[in-house]
Image: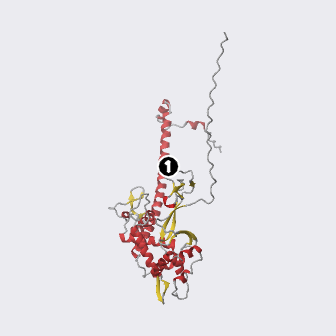
Amino acid sequence: MPPKTRRSQPKAADSEPEAVTTGKTLPPSSTNPPLLFVLPENRSKDSRILTLPHPATTNPVRFFFCPDDGIYEFRRIAAPKKAPRSWLLAPEEHEDTGGRQAPSLVEEHDVSKGFAIEQPDLFVATPMDPLFMLLPALAADIQEDAPKLFLSLDDHLDNLPPSKHLQHVLQSATFRVTLEKRTMAVCDHVEVGNEKMYRLSVERVVRELVKKAEKMVVNGLPASMEHDLVQEALQRPVPIIVRQESSSGLEVEPATDSQSSVPSMPAGDPQASVLSAMTVETDVTSTSTVSARNHGASDEVVRLLRVRTALDTMLTSYVAPTLRGQVQSVLSSKKAPVDFKPLDDYLQQLTSMRKEVQALRSLSDNISRKRSHVDEEVEAAREEKRRKKEEEEAKKKNQSRGTKQLAKVNTSGMQKLSSFFTKAPAKKAKS
């Protein structure tokens, strides 16, 4: 019989080769990445994104132009730097475009043909009044000494800086009607034959801007502008009083409604006469939202400040400096369509109150520093007295019984032990 041997293990069946996954190579980053724009709905097919001179600075800026709806400016919306964000865009099929591809925000779509934008900026097209584009042309010769002449609209438009995109806007017949309407709103006009002639009127410009500002107030200012420029500016300080203490001088504390806002001073204090006529109030820094009920301004004062805030925003953002100064001069004169005197009086009152508060704060700081210095000296004397007392108590505890008994012996009339060791006085010589 053949010898028994260890059976060899059966060969494993050849396994199928593992599928090797190869990653798709991404294209390099673009040096000119695309931007994400939000455009108005129902826009005309002839609408374009153009580069036009900004009405306030004449710098070239991107605008969206629609012959039917007018000019739109782009507002940039960016994510906070502390919260990194990015856009992921992918193509999307449109039935009404014959199957053409267009980038769109990804919503459960295949992103294999998409791309990412590192900067999460969003540019939203917001409507802008064409009047602001016309003002630089209408006010081109407003500072010249020569009398202002009536000119045609084309002659005024020739004052604008040359631009191919601007010519495209001016040549639109539909938009031309809008330009003429806005020109008549701010200009004195006459008819010469079949042609209208225009001359800019600063008073008309002011009335038109005030009308737009009041409309902004009715619709509501942005929350940040309302809080920072209106409510915070009208916030009244919280009153405080100065009360007298018997031992440590004066102390400043918030006043209640039942307490007087005039501080009480010690008799004979030379500063008493100064502070007695002072309205003692201090500013309050609060992190909570300031509401209109927290200040003492009337509804008319609040409305006037909102109108002025809207006017200042428009003048700074859309009006050239050459015309801005004349508009502000009219607003501060008797020709202004709105009277800001109640607002100016209230703001002047707040300014005076804050100055008085600053004077009181300086006085209270000096008193606090003097009081702190006196308290430090008193505390140091108490500490020294406490230390000496503790040393004496510790010394008494370490004395023996015999030493304590000797301390009770009456030593009056006895000579001290050191007297026996002193040098004897020299004897006088006999004469």
- Percent x, y of residue 402: 49, 30
Question: Would you identify the image quadrant in which residue 266 lies?
Answer: bottom left
Direction from residue 167 to residue 187 in the image, left or right: left
Nearer to us in this view, 209 or 127? 127
Q: Residue furthest right?
A: 2
At label 1, the amino acid type is: Ala
Nearer to us in this view, 26 or 323? 26
Residue at position x 47%, y 55% from top? 372
On-image quarter of the N terminus: top right
Total numbered labels placed on residues in the image: 1
Q: Residue furthest bottom?
A: 193
Residue 331 makes an appearance in the image:
no
How crowded pointer 1 is (Cα within 10 Å; few <14, some 14-19, many 20+) is rated as: few
Nearer to us in this view, 384 or 81? 81
Question: Would you identify the image quadrant in which residue 255 lies?
Answer: bottom left
- Percent x, y of residue 363: 46, 63
- Percent x, y of residue 314: 48, 72
For disc 1, the marked residue is 380
Q: Is residue 80 above or below residue 63?
A: above
- Percent x, y of residue 51: 57, 70
| Label 1: which secondary element | helix
Direction from residue 215 to residue 106 in the image, left or right: right
